[in-house]
Amino acid sequence: MRPLKLKGLIRIVMSLPLLGLMGLSVSCEVSEYKPGAANQGSESPLNTTDAEKSPAAENQNSKDNDNKQSDDGLNEIPVDEDEDKKADETAKAERINRILGLVEEYDNGPTEDRTTVEQLKLWIEADSPERPLYIVDSRFIEEFEVSHLPGALHQSVFYDKLDNGEIPASARVVVYCTIGFRSSFFTQGLKDEASVSEVWNLEGSILMWVNQGNAVYTSDNVESKDVHVFDERWDVLPDGYVAVKFPAE
């Protein structure tokens, strides 16, 4: 197995108010109908006082009121939930901007070598024997074992496959680490040494992956909320995740 090349470079300090519904009560006063009073030329009126409303009319009024309440409920804005959602979106945008800032500060590789999380997900869907995709984790094995991208190979395993001729020339390789610093070196090394058609460095690496709502997994293929972030500087995780770090030296 080829020795890991980067160990000497890595350990750096890196959420309408309900409107009250007013029932309308209609009372009609009409002259009492007297049988035999035809000489008055009046027809027999229908007495429609509230006390004598038909059950069918009462049921219809009840249904109308229920429907109106239902419509009002659909139009009601849950203010607290809406504010919480906006706060979550703002926090996410701030984290992603911070990650992008770290990328620009520490990713020393050419920008044309970078690919995005969105593009990687498309490549995962398009993976095929004719154009296989290899996702390579260039971090230490201790970091990889905490959690990694789905289907990722640790760099040592990838190198073994490469040396054994198991990686076809048509392969597409995407490399990542914590933020993109180490993977930029790994990407350049593969471009120089390996006979594969494409090698890409994942912009923002595992931090960008989880901050865009994607899952990571343990070596037993169990979804995990633990992410190794190397040290305090790279602790840019969404709520609900646990940052694992190397002990401070």
Image: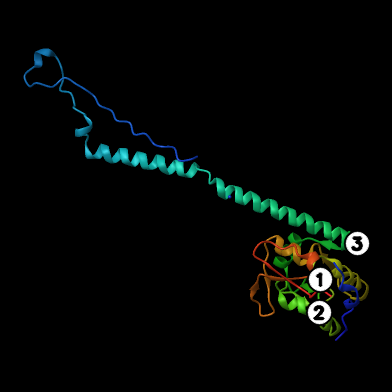
Q: Residue at x 50, y 42 (%)?
A: 75
In the image, is residue 54 above or below residue 166? above
- Secondary-structure class at tag 2: helix
Mark 3 highlights which residue? Answer: 110
Q: Which mark is residue 47?
A: none
Task: Say whether residue 71 is left or right of residue 204.
Answer: left
Task: Say whether residue 167 is left or right of residue 213.
Answer: right
Q: Which mark is residue 173?
A: 1
The residues tagged by marks 3 and 2 sit, at their Cα atoms, a distance apart of: 23 Å
Name which residue type carries label 1: Val
Asked if the residue at tag 2 contacts the one at tag 1, i.e. Cβ–Cβ closer than 8 Å, the answer is yes
The residues tagged by marks 1 and 3 sit, at their Cα atoms, a distance apart of: 16 Å
Residue 198 in sight here: no
Q: Residue at x 79, y 73 (%)?
A: 136
In the image, is residue 218 above or below residue 34? below
- The answer to which image quadrant residue 96 occupies is bottom right
Among all residues in the image, which is located at the extreme front?
Answer: 249
- Secondary-structure class at tag 1: strand
The mark nearer the N terminus, 1 or 2, is 2
Residue 137 in sight here: yes
Name which residue type carries label 2: Phe
Instruction: Quarter of the image for the N terminus: give it.
Output: bottom right
Task: Say whether residue 66 is left or right of residue 153.
Answer: left
Viewer-proximal residue among 100 and 37: 100
